[in-house]
Amino acid sequence: MVSRIHQKLGTAGLIIAIIALIAALAGTAFAAAGLNSKQKKEVKKIAKQFAGKPGAPGQPGAQGPAGPQGPAGKNGSSGTDGKNGTDGKSVVSTELPPGPGEECPEGGYSFEVEGSGNENFVCNGASSTGPLRSGETITGSWSFSAAPGDTRPLASISYPREWENPTGELRWAIGSAVECPGTLSEPKAEPGFLCVYMKELVGTSQAFPEFHGVGNEGRSGAVMEFKAEATDASHGYGVWVLTAQ
């Protein structure tokens, strides 16, 4: 077969055919020394005739190691300056002297944001021990329950702190009164007065009860004495409030 190709193509043609066949079988291209441009074209032509179709892609190889870290990027340009904030407002504070009827009976301070018109108060705390100071208010509850035959039921009031009562006035507030201007849900007493508000009273008169001072000339508490019918049980309860003068 080779002799027939040699006879047909000659020595130069045979060399070209062999080179083309090797290139086609190897699936690659290489330079053949000593071939002119025409012979090179013949090699490519013959190689194309004998070249097979491309094979299927092979399996991907294993991932190679990570490359070295690249250089750091350049710093970005500076941002634009923000807008200036608005000027803050000052706070005006005023020391308050103590006194009854004031926002802070024990004294304290008032604070107002300049130009707001809203005044806020921080008051000194009232003492939790010792006698009541002028303007201080304390409150509590009272009650009694008496069996039939008890015609003088008593309800006691005990002050948590001593109260010097310069007026000696103890008021029973069933309705409104000048010295007891509050209500059962919001009891109030003018300075120098003890006011008692009734929630319920059964089996006894709603007339003003008799008050008795208890200990230290009435500075520790008081007792209210009611009048009841001998044939019926009686009871009553409510709240009390006093304000020191």
Image (cartoon, rainbow, N blue to C red):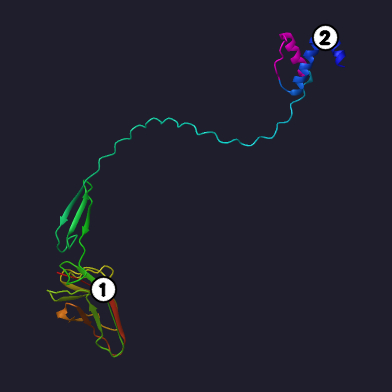
Q: Is residue 1 left or right of residue 179?
A: right
Query: How far from the left and from the top, in percent, is residue 12?
Result: 79, 10
Looking at the image, residue 116 lies above or below residue 74: below
Q: Position of residue 165 (x, y in %)?
A: 14, 74
Q: Is residue 39 magenta?
A: yes
Q: Residue 47's spot in the image, x, y percent?
A: 76, 18
Q: Earlier in the sequence, mark 2 or mark 1?
A: 2
Q: Kindly tell me whether residue 8 is visible in this rendering.
A: yes
Q: Residue at x 26, y 67 (%)?
A: 186
Q: Is 217 within the magenta?
A: no
For the residues labelled 2 and 1, the Cα–Cα distance comes to 135 Å
What amino acid is labelled 1 in the image? Gly
- Establish if 167 lies above or below 74: below
Q: Secondary structure at mark 2?
A: helix
| Residue at 75%, 10% in the rendered image | 39
Quadrant housing residue 179: bottom left
The kind of residue tagged 2 is Gly
- What secondary structure is marked by label 1? strand
Q: Which-is-in-front pick, marks 2 and 1?
A: 2
Q: Quadrant of residue 175?
A: bottom left
Q: Bounds of the magenta span?
A: 29-48
**Residue 208 seen in this snapshot:** no
Above or below, comparing residue 177 to residue 225 in the picture: above
Instruction: Point out the image quarter for the C terminus.
Output: bottom left
Give the labeled residue for mark 1. 140
Q: What secondary structure do most residues of the magenta stretch adopt?
A: helix
Q: Residue at x 43, y 30 (%)?
A: 74
Front residue (pair 75, 9): 9
Mark 1: give few (<14), some (14-19) or many (20+) Cα within 10 Å. Answer: some
Query: Hey, which quadrant is residue 173 in on the image?
Result: bottom left
Residue on which the image places disc 2: 10
